[in-house]
């Protein structure tokens, strides 16, 4: 990734970037492997937010999630030449992200700092910027909506790690069972079983608070 | 279908993956069981709220940080993979090691050959105080050592050899000359 020196070069590169935007992942990957370094920027642009949200919903720490997304892209950059192009790039990227998130959760479970981070997270909730909501909603509806958001976030965090990853991949990322199996390295039966347990747990945690 | 079976098959039910007959039984149970209806409603509302959560955006510094890390990655890769760079680096290391080894060997040889090098290399050691009077005594006793060819010194010397010389030049007791 070279620094752009002048505007004409910048213009041509922007043109190049827009060319990549029209390609599917496999062609962008091939372009990068053929020496077009700007193709990597396109991969970053496509996946940075998705991977950040996936990791954030899995580990629950915004800053650390961003560090891990950086690590995902470094690993992709480092090993892209070894990537099996008969498979989906997104599945591979999510596999790396999922492994890093799982490692993070395991490290945290051995580290007492996790308690502090859990507390800090609730502090941060009070300092979130104001968000505009639908002005047609009644105040009690708005309150319920906000309460429900906090509730579902906490409910996901309370799921066991291997259930949570499967749950987030399915419910938030919309992955198929087969993709989840590939990402998590489990067989299809395990994925179905974990997902069913995760859904049951999620519903059981949230149900008493909804009435 | 009872509650246990409903919960066991809930995931497939939620995804619409149950066989037609099992689907019918599940719906029938749902209509009859308030607890499972409540459970199903909680799940669907919860997932809907989860999907409505505002997405997290990457920070402004994300791209710059990533570029910095990838630049570093490029440098590491160039050093590790490029054989020319590797060879140059190896050559530099060899030359450096060679020069240092040669230098050390030279120093070692010099130390062996001339111990004076050791004294010159070592901090100067003060002479013992007793050495000064010894040297002065010797010079006073034998000044010709400082000026070995000074005829005055030789004549006025009080050494036995000088005494013998002095006797040779003594005026004879009986002077025969006029």
Image (cartoon, coloured by chain):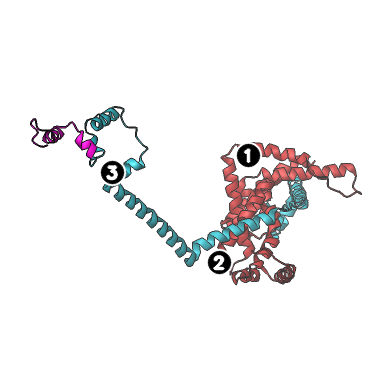
Q: Residue at x 72, y 45 (%)?
A: A153
Image quarter hosting the C terminus of chain B: top left
Horizontal and vertical percent for residue A169?
66, 55
Give the CA distance from mark 3 to mark 2: 64 Å
Q: Residues within 10 Å of mark 1 (few under 14, many from 20)?
A: some
Which residues are drawn in magenta? B151-178
Q: Does the magenta stretch include residue B156?
A: yes
**Picture layout, residue A123 above or below residue B65:** above
Task: Tell which chain the image draws in cyan.
Answer: B
Q: Which residue is drawn at 32% across and 42% down?
A: B118
| Tags 3 and 1 touching, CB below 8 Å | no
Mark 2: secondary structure:
helix
| Quadrant of res B151 | top left
- The residue that label 3 is drawn on is B115
Nearer the viewer's eye, disc 3 or disc 2? 3
Label of residue A10 in the image: none
- The residue that label 2 is drawn on is A81
According to the rendering, which colour does chain A have?
Answer: red
| Tags 1 and 2 touching, CB below 8 Å | no
Residue nearest the viewer, comparing A202 with B39? A202
Mark 3: secondary structure:
helix
Give the CA distance from mark 1 to mark 2: 36 Å
Q: Is residue B51 visible?
A: yes
């Amino acid at each position: 990734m070279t620094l752009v020196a002048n505007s004409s070069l910048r213009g041509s590169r922007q043109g190049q970037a827009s060319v990549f935007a029209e390609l599917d992942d496999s062609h962008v990957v091939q372009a990068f492997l053929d020496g077009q370094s700007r193709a990597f920027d396109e991969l970053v642009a496509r996946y940075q937010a998705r991977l950040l949200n996936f990791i954030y919903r899995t580990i629950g720490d915004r800053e650390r999630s961003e560090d891990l997304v950086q690590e995902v892209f470094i690993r992709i950059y480092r090993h892209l030449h070894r990537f099996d192009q008969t498979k989906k790039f997104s599945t591979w990227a999510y596999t790396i992200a999922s492994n890093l998130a799982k490692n993070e959760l395991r490290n945290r479970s051995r580290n007492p700092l996790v308690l502090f981070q859990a507390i800090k997270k609730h502090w941060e909730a009070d300092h979130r910027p104001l968000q505009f909501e639908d002005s047609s909603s009644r105040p009690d509806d708005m309150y319920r909506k906000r309460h429900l958001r906090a509730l579902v976030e906490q409910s996901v965090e309370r799921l066991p790690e291997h259930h949570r990853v499967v749950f987030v991949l399915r419910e938030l990322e919309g992955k198929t069972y087969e993709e989840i199996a590939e990402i998590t390295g489990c067989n299809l039966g395990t994925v179905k079983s974990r997902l069913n347990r995760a859904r049951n747990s999620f519903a059981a945690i949230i149900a008493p608070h909804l009435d | 279908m009872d509650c246990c079976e409903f919960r066991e098959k809930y995931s497939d039910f939620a995804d619409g993956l149950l066989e037609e007959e099992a689907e019918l039984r599940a719906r029938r149970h749902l209509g009859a069981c308030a607890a499972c209806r409540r459970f199903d409603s909680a799940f669907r509302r919860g997932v809907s709220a989860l999907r409505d959560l505002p997405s997290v955006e990457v920070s402004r510094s994300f791209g710059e940080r990533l570029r910095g890390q990838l630049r570093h990655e490029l440098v590491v890769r160039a050093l590790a993979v490029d054989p020319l760079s590797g060879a140059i680096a190896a050559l530099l290391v060899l030359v450096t090691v060679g020069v240092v080894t040669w230098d050390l060997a030279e120093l070692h040889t010099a130390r062996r050959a001339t111990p004076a090098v050791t004294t010159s290399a070592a901090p100067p050691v003060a002479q013992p105080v007793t050495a000064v009077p010894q040297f002065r005594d010797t010079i006073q006793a034998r000044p010709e050592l400082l000026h070995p060819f000074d005829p005055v010194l030789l004549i006025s010397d009080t050494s036995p050899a000088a005494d013998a010389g002095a006797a040779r030049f003594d005026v004879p007791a009986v002077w025969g000359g006029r």
